[in-house]
Amino acid sequence: MHKILLVEDNEMNRDMLSRRLERRGFEVIMALDGAQGVKMARSENPTLILMDMSLPVMDGWTATRTLKDDPATARIPVIGLSAHAMSSDLNKALEAGCDDYDTKPIDLIRLLEKMQTQLDKSRPN
């Protein structure tokens, strides 16, 4: 079973997405801000991280850079999530180290496809 770290400060988004992922067999752990997300990524070793980019305490860009700069967490795929759909936002997320990017409101089928692509890439040979 894949353990997904969902870093999301909006309670409604967090609740909706975590329930939908759990129904599809994922174990979901949650962090409410970027700093907590970094800490949980280090302690919980998730298979994949869904990172909201607009977070309190430490934003998603900084949290992703921090995770990608740490050899202990650099290999964990990160999918950035944001309500901003501009190509500059996509580029900014990829520059921060996100492996992919998706926009809110979440299209679950599209997100699941992106998650599967990243899980397949990170699977050891």
Image: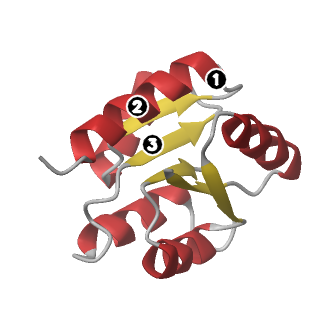
Element type where label 3 sits in the image:
strand
Residue closest to the eye, 125 or 77: 125
Indicate the quadrant where residue 119 lies. Answer: top left
Residue 97 visible here: yes
Which residue is at a point 29% across and 65% down the rendered structure image?
A: 68
Identity of the amino acid at label 1? Leu
Residue 20 horizontal/vertical position (percent): 74, 34
Tag nearer the camera, 3 or 1: 1
Residue 117 horizontal/vertical position (percent): 33, 30
Residue 55 visible here: no
Pointer 2: what residue?
116
Element type where label 1 sits in the image:
helix
Name the outermost residue toward the left.
Answer: 125
Element type where label 2 sits in the image:
helix
Identity of the amino acid at label 2? Gln
Which residue is at a point 70% across and 43% down the rendered structure image?
A: 22
Residue 64 horizontal/vertical position (percent): 41, 60
Residue closest to the eye, 24 or 95: 24
Distance from label 1 to label 2 (Cα)? 12 Å
Q: Which one is earlier in the sequence, the residue at label 2 or at label 3?
A: 3
- Checking the image for residue 79, the label placed there is 3
Pointer 1: what residue?
108
Decide: few, some or many residues near mark 2? Use Cα within 10 Å; few <14, some 14-19, many ≥20.
few
Identity of the amino acid at label 3? Ile
